[in-house]
């Protein structure tokens, strides 16, 4: 596991990347910056990583999970229901490779608006 910090506007939260091959690609690309897009209670943005769907890729995710969306080459932060959700749990538009999780309160991302600069970097 690698510790990272995700910052978006006034939000800055610690997180960790898991040991999956896709998470390693994300780790190797750090620091990463982009502009937030939102989809319900999800913030996502394109990153300079190209990975295929993992064998364990899934659309149903947990609050606080971080994903890589192969279809959009995007990093995703899930913190509540999305338009694809059936209940209160997040659901991605299509399967994502889960690459880590937020350490703490992921719902802080609710204040992030589309176009906000997002930065992922190694935790000092």
Image (spheres, rainbow, N blue to C red):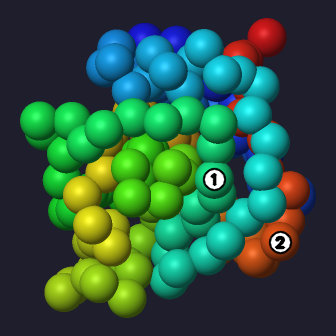
Q: Position of residue 48 (x, y in %)?
A: 64, 36
Task: State the image quarter where residue 32 is shown.
Answer: top right
Task: State the image quarter where residue 53 is shown.
Answer: top left
Left-right relation of 56 to 76: left
Locate the C terminus and report the quarter of the image it occupies.
Answer: top right
What is the number of the mark on residue 24?
A: none
Q: Position of residue 72 (x, y in %)?
A: 48, 59
Residue bearing mark 2: 115
- Specify few, some or many for label 2: CA neighbours under 10 Å numbering under 14, 14-19, or 20 or more: some
- Specify few, some or many for label 1: CA neighbours under 10 Å numbering under 14, 14-19, or 20 or more: some
Above or below for 62 versus 24: below
Residue 77 visible in the displayed image: no
Secondary structure of residue under mark 2: loop
Left-right relation of 43 to 25: right
Left-right relation of 72 to 36: left
Q: Earlier in the sequence, mark 2 or mark 1?
A: 1
Above or below for 45 versus 1: below
Nearest-to-viewer mark from 2 and 1: 1
At x 51%, y 50%, the residue is: 73
Residue bearing mark 1: 46
Q: Nearer the viewer, residue 101 or 26?
A: 26
Secondary structure of residue under mark 1: strand
Marks 2 and 1, how far apart in space? 12 Å
Q: How many marks?
A: 2
The single residue placed furthest to the left in the displayed view is 55
Above or below for 114 versus 32: below
Above or below for 95 versus 23: below
Task: State the image quarter where residue 28 is shown.
Answer: top right
At x 31%, y 51%, the residue is: 96
Left-right relation of 88 to 121: left
Residue 89 visible in the displayed image: yes
At x 39%, y 58%, the residue is: 71
């Amino acid at each position: 596991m690698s510790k990272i910090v995700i910052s978006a506007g006034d939000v800055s939260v610690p997180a960790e990347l898991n040991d999956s091959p896709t998470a390693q690609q994300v780790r190797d690309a750090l620091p990463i910056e982009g502009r937030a897009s939102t989809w319900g209670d999800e913030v996502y943005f394109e990153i300079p990583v190209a990975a295929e769907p993992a064998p364990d890729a899934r659309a149903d995710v947990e609050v606080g999970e971080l994903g890589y969306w192969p279809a959009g080459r995007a990093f995703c932060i899930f913190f509540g229901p999305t338009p694809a959700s059936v209940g209160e749990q997040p659901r991605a538009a299509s399967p994502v490779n889960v690459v880590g999780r937020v350490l703490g309160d992921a719902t802080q991302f609710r204040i992030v608006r589309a176009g906000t600069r997002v930065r992922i970097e190694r935790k000092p």
